[in-house]
Image (spheres, rainbow, N blue to C red):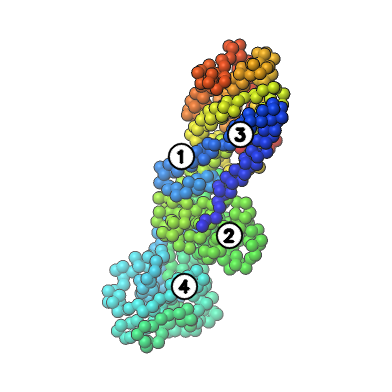
Amino acid sequence: TRTQTAFDRGVNSVSWLLIRFMLIMVPVVLLINGFSKGDWVEASLFALAVAVGLTPEMLPMIVSSNLAKGAIAMSRRKVIVKRLNAIQNFGAMDVLCTDKTGTLTQDNIFLEHHLDVSGVKSSRVLMLAWLNSSSQSGARNVMDRAILRFGEGRIAPSTKARFVKRDELPFDFVRRRVSVLVEDTQHGDRCLICKGAVEEMMMVATHLREGDRVVALTETRRELLLAKTEDYNAQGFRVLLIATRKLDGSGNNPTLSVEDETELTIEGMLTFLDPPKESAGKAIAALRDNGVAVKVLTGDNPVVTARICLEVGIDTHDILTGTQVEAMSDAELASEVEKRAVFARLTPLQKTRILQALQKNGHTVGFLGDGINDAPALRDADVGISVDSAADIAKESSDIILLEKDLMVLEEGVIKGRETFGNIIKYLNMTASSNFGNVFSVLVASAFIPFLPMLAIHLLIQNLMYDISQLSLPWDKMDKEFLRKPRKWDAKNIGRFMLWIGPTSSIFDITTFALMWYVFAANNVEAQALFQSGWFIEGLLSQTLVVHMLRTQKIPFIQSRATLPVLLTTGLIMAIGIYIPFSPLGAMVGLEPLPLSYFPWLVATLLSYCLVAQGMKRFYIKRFGQWF
């Protein structure tokens, strides 16, 4: 099972915030109305309606619509979103960990050199490499495929027919070697051919071949060979060593074990080139400009990794290796991952450990990889990203698949994720603050007037219409300032927004109460329908205006205008809200037409609300340094 992502954790925290708020406010409304009015049945129904009003019923629909809209937009850029939640995690991502091969590089590896230990081109080394790669029964990696492509037309058919595979030891990320046992059918000799990373091969080698002679691998020869490989690494080449060992030719069913990988004779080296993608440097710069740090996690050699990273603009200062990671405690690693941008010679488990350390530090982490060894990290990341040409297990473990290897789409994914999150959080902040303001108004009215300020059915109709007005939010746009940095779910911020912004609308609800009570004489039980109608219209219109006032930190309609669907939906709901008290439906639910003299007061109230809400918005941003 997958671990919870930042999206899952955020939704849970916000849900519990709203539940706690409802559990506190509903009993308070029930008790005040019950004791002040004496009708506990009516008070219970009203409290139940308040509970419904406090519930963001449209949240699942808003979230699903936003995520689906984002997924459709991404699909047009040839990006497949397997898990919709990953869209929002894209926007929240502040660290992208990426493998090197196939992600930063073109994944078009080709064999450049096949050399003996002296650095001279060697057909024997090519033959041994071809036998090793062609004899593997498991999934071949990109370097094996490069060897086989290079060998086409260069390896004689007679050589292919002469050697028969007898057994093999597959590659693993601890040994970093792969061995095959082949038999020469002409002479009956059996030979172990081992291919692997330089350091790991030198650990099990005792000799090397110099021309026709096999000589001891002395410390001097070891240093000379290591210097040659490092020189190729510095030029951007990946280097593998080829070694052999003759084994006993007896027995019909020979088997290999790890113990056989000893006393090997190094035959030569292979160098491979995998140039960086043209889009990699631009993509990394774009991500950095959008507040996303890029870290490279690779199993490759540190020198080769540094060369590629420098070419694409990643800081290679103080590379951390898998051996160093293994020796660190979790606390030490949590500190080091913040300081380094490149990690090399990692095992799959070490990649996962680094990723988890970043998550524990509070980061939302994406991982971009395409190999078998990337699967654990892809699964544990908040958003796992792979490419269409990746290994099946990598694609299975990922949340997002790039059908084209253009990394610039990552920036678009980040922006789309932030836009999606913005429209979701916009709905939550609007709903939570507006509902809190309504409840606050209800508490004030219930304490001072002898009848319910609004019937339960009025609250439900008002809540339904307000929710409908917000259905177009997934098609709204976000201000460019909002999209510039990662965004995360924060229940604390939503609670603060609700407590500070919500009571603003209550000021004008209370002025409407005073207007209906003193100016229109709706101050007794017989006139309660007029009072309720006046607050119904003012409450619905101010709530609907909230959509425009709170959707942006700028001045609405002037500096930032909502999209056409939002303008049409909110305008229609406001028109219907004004009409309802004059309609047969209004009469059925206990509302009555309002005198025309009410409407100038209504316009003045709503204009005043817009001015005060804008002033409160500026104060809030200055006080807390952010809007959403």
Instruction: Check the image and report above or below for 16 versus 313.
Output: above
Q: Which residue is mark 3?
A: 48
Residue 543 seen anywhere in this rendered image of the structure: no
Q: Residue at x 40, y 42 (%)?
A: 76
Q: CA distance from mark 4 to mark 3?
A: 68 Å
Residue count near mark 4 (Cα–Cα under 10 Å), binned few <14, some 14–19, many ≥20: many
The residue carrying mark 2 is: 354
Q: Nearer the viewer, mark 4 or mark 3?
A: 3
C-alpha span from label 2 to label 3: 49 Å
Foreground tag (4 vs 2):
2
Q: Residue at x 72, y 23 (%)?
A: 448
Amino acid of disc 3? Leu
Left or right relative to 265: residue 330: right
Residue 589 higher or lower than 342, as above or below? above
**How many tags in the picture?**
4
The image quadrant where one finds the C terminus is: top right
Real-space CA distance between mark 2 and mark 1, rounded to the nearest whole angstrom: 33 Å
Q: Earlier in the sequence, mark 4 or mark 3?
A: 3
Element under disc 2:
helix
